[in-house]
Amino acid sequence: MATPLDDAALFRRIEDFLTRCIHCIDDDRLEEWPDFFTERCRYKIISRENHDRGLPLGVMECDSRGMLKDRIASLRRANVYEPHTYRHQISALQVEPLDGGAFACRSNYLVVRTMTGGAMSIFSTGRYLDRIVAEGDDLRFEERLVVFESRQVETLLVIPL
């Protein structure tokens, strides 16, 4: 990141936005999750290998808030999977101001999955590469790239990362 954000209050506002988004997922309030995105947005989960090589193929890509809502609706109604929960750990947030009032954000993530029987495992780790914009008094993701480290794709990828 070229120019770090030097406004502590704004940095804290962005950090709070990211935290609220993660709590929304971890607390199973998934129907609220698409509201963290602009109407026309991009949410993509891609391997580090493909991202670093400039290869566009990810394991999931949505390009609108409507697609994100459909994903949650299918998760609730159509997908069959063993119930489980996530807990995210987010660290190393960097924020860079961009033209037009947008922000490029980078952070590391670790997701621990807990199955109903109590078994826990590291589900995914990697980094978030976000473009955040203001919509009125609220912040929204214009783009969220989830770049995961492993070459393995978990077959139980139903809850948003």
Image: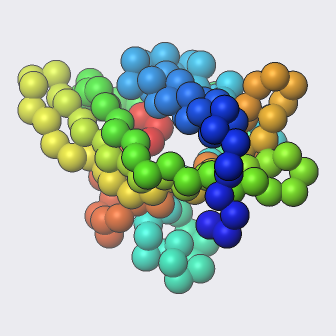
Check the image and report above or below for 41 versus 52.
above
Specify whether 70 is left or right of 149.
Answer: right
Residue at the spot x=56%, y=54% of the render? 94
Picture quadrant where residue 126 is located: bottom left
Identify the image quadrant of the N terminus: bottom right
Check the image and report above or below for 117 versus 123.
above
User: Can residue 29 be spotted in the picture?
Assistant: yes
Spot occupied by residue 77 in the image (x, y as percentages of width and height): 48, 21
Residue at the spot x=35%, y=64% of the render? 149
User: Can residue 21 be spotted in the picture?
Assistant: no
Specify whether 128 is left or right of 139.
Answer: left
Count of numbered circles in the view: 0
Q: 27 or 7: nearer the eye?
A: 7
Residue at the spot x=9%, y=23% of the render? 117
Spot occupied by residue 4 in the image (x, y as percentages of width and height): 65, 58
Picture quadrant where residue 64 is located: top right
Residue at the spot x=73%, y=50% of the render? 103
Identify the image quadrant of the C terminus: top left
* Residue found farthest to the bottom: 53
Spot occupied by residue 90 in the image (x, y as percentages of width and height): 40, 42
Picture quadrant where residue 48 is located: bottom left
Check the image and report above or below for 14 versus 144.
above
Spot occupied by residue 24 in the image (x, y as percentages of width and height): 49, 22
Q: 92 or 117: nearer the eye?
A: 92
Check the image and report above or below for 127 versus 90.
below
